[in-house]
Image (tube, rainbow, N blue to C red):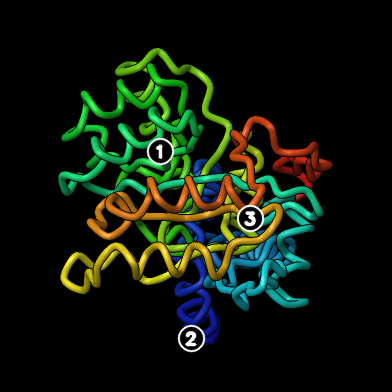
Amino acid sequence: MQSLKPKCFRLFLLYNSCPSAKNIQTNFLRLGGTSVKKTIITCLSVLMMFGLCLGTAQAVSNVRYDWGFNKGKNEEPADAGPKYNAIVEKYGAIYKVETTKKEIYLTFDNGYENGYTEKVLDVLKEHKVPAAFFVTGHYLKTAEPLVKRMVKEGHIIGNHSWNHPDFTHVSDDKLKEELDTVKQKTAELTGQKEMKYMRPPRGIFSERTLQLCNDLGYKHILWSVAFLDWDVNRQQGWKYSYDNIMAQVHPGAIILLHSVSRDNAEALGKAITDLKKRGYTFKSLDELPAIKAPEKKEPNDLKS
């Protein structure tokens, strides 16, 4: 039986990559037997679990996507291209609304507080503009008064994960924990018990992570207007932010701004005023047109 050992050693690597294989092996070994039987059972259990793991990987790919698009100009919509448009449609995500109506959606990513969100909220209140704030765990822990104010003044809190990881590098259970913790903490602070929208950390996702988030009841909110505004060491003045917003805006745009930006805080009021003059109205994410939701996949479906 020595000839079995090299083969089983090679399979051992696969065995360790599928932890549930150990459970199968343990259950088999409860039957007792010689070392030979143990060797055979180990090989068989590894082969079984390898087949299951391979089937799952083939069913839902974890190949990484980094969100990006061709920017809009002259009020023509941004376009992510065939590859990204296909995956967005397949999983019911959204980065723009296909419309000729001058309706736009204002969203912010809040990873940490840099002293400008209060001004942003003041401007939104003054102009009666709704927004969505996608927050992290760090933000929830360190900016409680601002989070409470967001909800009190009618804005939406969205999920941006607890630790802002690359979702393609975390397990299914860890991904769920990242989202659940934000949802629970938000409810604790604000009373907002429902959390329908999420934005993948770093703009990174895969078919696997899209499906998992869908199964947890989230709609992915990507964006069609954005620029380099998150680097606090590269702020260029209010006009930089204003010019980028005005140049890229289009009917149905979802605008992404980062609240850490001084430029954004200083430009926001003028941008809102001038966009309204151009005929634009600001809508809440809750007013997004209905989009057919992708079918949820049951666990057994993922293993077929």
Please tell me how many numbered marks the rendered image carries.
3
The dot on residue 253 is: 3
* Figure check: 49 above or below 286: below
Which residue is labeled 1 in the image?
A: 177
> Which quadrant of the structure image shows residue 45?
bottom right
Q: CA distance from mark 3 to mark 1?
A: 31 Å
Indicate which label's residue lies in the foreground, 3 or 2: 3
The dot on residue 6 is: 2
Q: Is residue 58 left or right of residue 2?
A: right
Name the element at disc 1: helix
Q: Is residue 285 left or right of residue 107?
A: right
Identify which amino acid the numbered label 1 is placed on: Glu
Identify which amino acid the numbered label 3 is placed on: Ala
Contact, CB < 8 Å: mark 3 with mark 1? no
Residue extending farthest top: 191
- Picture coordinates of residue 33, whole percent (x, y): 51, 52
Mark 3: give few (<14), some (14-19) or many (20+) Cα within 10 Å: many
**Point 52% across, 64% down: residue:** 246
Identify which amino acid the numbered label 2 is placed on: Pro
